[in-house]
Image: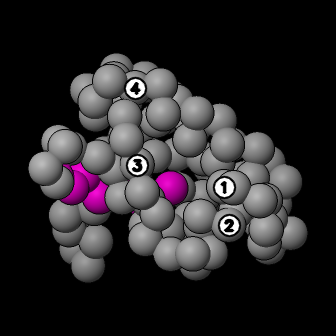
Amino acid sequence: MRFRFRTRKLKALYTEEKGAHKYPSQVVDSFFEVMSIIAAARDERDLYRLKGLRFERLAGDRKGERSLRLNNQFRLIVVIEQDDQGRYLLIVDIADYHR
């Protein structure tokens, strides 16, 4: 599945591992694993099928966003968007759910 990053910070983490020291190493490892799963997915249905990711819609102030589990504490926040080439994931944030 195609994806884009909302911020340069997330893109730099993905392309250069820049800023990785700001997260626990397990979270960074999981981020790269989840990103490879996203890249290999045909569409969001493939993400729903992988129950361990817990790909789910969010509510409240995050309505319209979805999350993928990185570990018990951190989630990758995404939005499904569409352009002239079809649907893609906008990678929004790595969120600490315990804050």
Q: Is residue 20 left or right of residue 67?
A: right
Label 2–label 3 contact, CB within 8 A: no
Q: Which residue is drawn at 64% across and 48% down?
A: 31
Can residue 37 be seen by looking at this rendering? Answer: yes
Q: Residue at x 40, y 26 (%)?
A: 41
In magenta segment, residue 5:
no
Circle 3 Cα neighbour tier, 10 Å, few/some/many (<14 / 14–19 / ≥20): some
> Which numbered marker is on residue 3?
3
Q: Which amino acid, by three-letter code, is at mark 2?
A: Ala
Q: Earlier along the polypeptide chain: callout 4 or callout 1?
A: 1
Label 4–label 1 contact, CB within 8 A: no
Look at mark 1 in the image and give the residue it sits on.
Answer: 14
Look at mark 4 in the image and give the residue it sits on.
Answer: 41
Q: In this view, does 22 lie above or below 79?
A: below
Label 2–label 1 contact, CB within 8 A: yes
Say which quadrant the N terminus sits in. top left
Look at mark 2 in the image and give the residue it sits on.
Answer: 12
Circle 1 Cα neighbour tier, 10 Å, few/some/many (<14 / 14–19 / ≥20): some
Percent coordinates x, y for residue 81 in the rendering: 21, 55
Which secondary structure is most common in the magenta stretch?
strand
Say which quadrant the C terminus sits in. bottom right
Percent coordinates x, y for residue 82 in the rendering: 16, 52
Q: Earlier along the polypeptide chain: callout 2 or callout 3?
A: 3
Percent coordinates x, y for residue 6 in the rendering: 43, 71
Q: Give the range drawn in magenta.
A: 76-82
Q: Earlier along the polypeptide chain: callout 3 or callout 1?
A: 3
- Please identify the quarter of the rendering in which residue 61 is found: bottom left
Separation of residues labelled 3 and 4 (CA atoms): 11 Å
Q: Residue at x 46, y 63 (%)?
A: 5
Q: Residue at x 62, y 75 (%)?
A: 9
